[in-house]
Image (spheres, grey):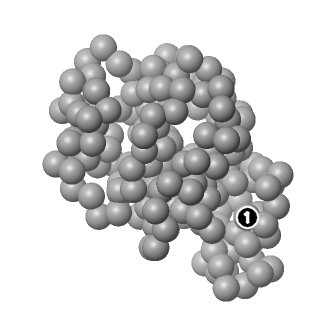
Amino acid sequence: MAQNNDKHILVAYFSATGTTARAAEKLANVTGGELYAITPAESYTSADLDWHDRQSRSSVEMNDPKARPAIKGKKENIADYDVIFIGYPIWWDLAPRVINTFIESHDLTGKTVIPFATSGGSTLSGSAAALKRSYPALNWKEGRLLNRADEKTIRTWIEKLGF
C-alpha cells in the first residue's frame, strides 16, 4: 500500500459498463481508499450509450454543457476525506455530465482532487483540463488514464503524486 496512513482517501467513480469500476477497485486496493460508486438516478442502457445515435441519452447529455443527470444520493461525511479520486469513462473527450453533478453536489473545497479515467481511444488530458476549467477553485493533481493498468503501475503513479 502507498504511504497514505495520514490521509483519508475516497475513490469515487462512475462506471457505465464496469471498466471504470474495475480500475477504481484496483486504485482503492493500492491506496487503501474507500470505494464510492457515483450512481445515476436512472441507469444507462446500452441504447443510452450509443454514441453513434445523436438522440441517445449520452449524446444528448454530452451535447448540453449544462446537463446534470440526477444521482442517487450523496456521499455522506465527504468532509472526512482529504483526497478524492474521481473516476469516469471518457465520453467525447470529456467526463460524463454525471461527474459534474457529483462535484457540484459535494463541497470539495480544500480537498486534493485527482481524476482518473478509462477510454477506448481518448487520453485523459482533454477531460481533465475541462474539469479544471469548470472547477478552478479545487486543488487538482495530475490524473491518469487507467486502461488495463495493474496495481504496480497504479502504485508507481500514486508514489509520484506523493502518497
Percent across and percent down for residue 155 are 21, 41
In this picture, residue 131 sits left or right of residue 27: right
Whether 43 is drawn above or below 36: the answer is below
Q: Residues within 10 Å of mark 1 (few under 14, many from 20)?
A: some
Quarter location, residue 22: bottom left
Any part of residue 38 in sight: yes
Depth check, front residue: 140 or 14:
140
Query: Which residue bears the numbered disc 1?
Result: 62
The C terminus lies in which quarter of the figure? top left
Q: Quadrant of residue 74?
A: top right
> Looking at this rendering, what residue extends furthest in the bottom direction?
52
Q: Residue at x 66, y 32 (%)?
A: 136
In this image, 22 relative to 75: left or right?
Answer: left
Identify residue type, mark 1.
Met
User: Looking at the picture, how far across and down is residue 63, in whole percent?
Assistant: 78, 66
Q: Work out whether residue 141 or residue 77 is closer to the camera in this orientation and state it.
A: 141
Which residue occupies 49% across, 16% down? 80
The residue located at (59%, 64%) in the rendering is: 93
Residue furthest toward the top? 6
Locate residue 101 relative to residue 38 in the image: left or right.
right
Q: Is residue 73 visible?
A: no
Q: Please, is residue 96 above or below residue 113 in the view? A: below
Quarter of the figure with residue 34: top left
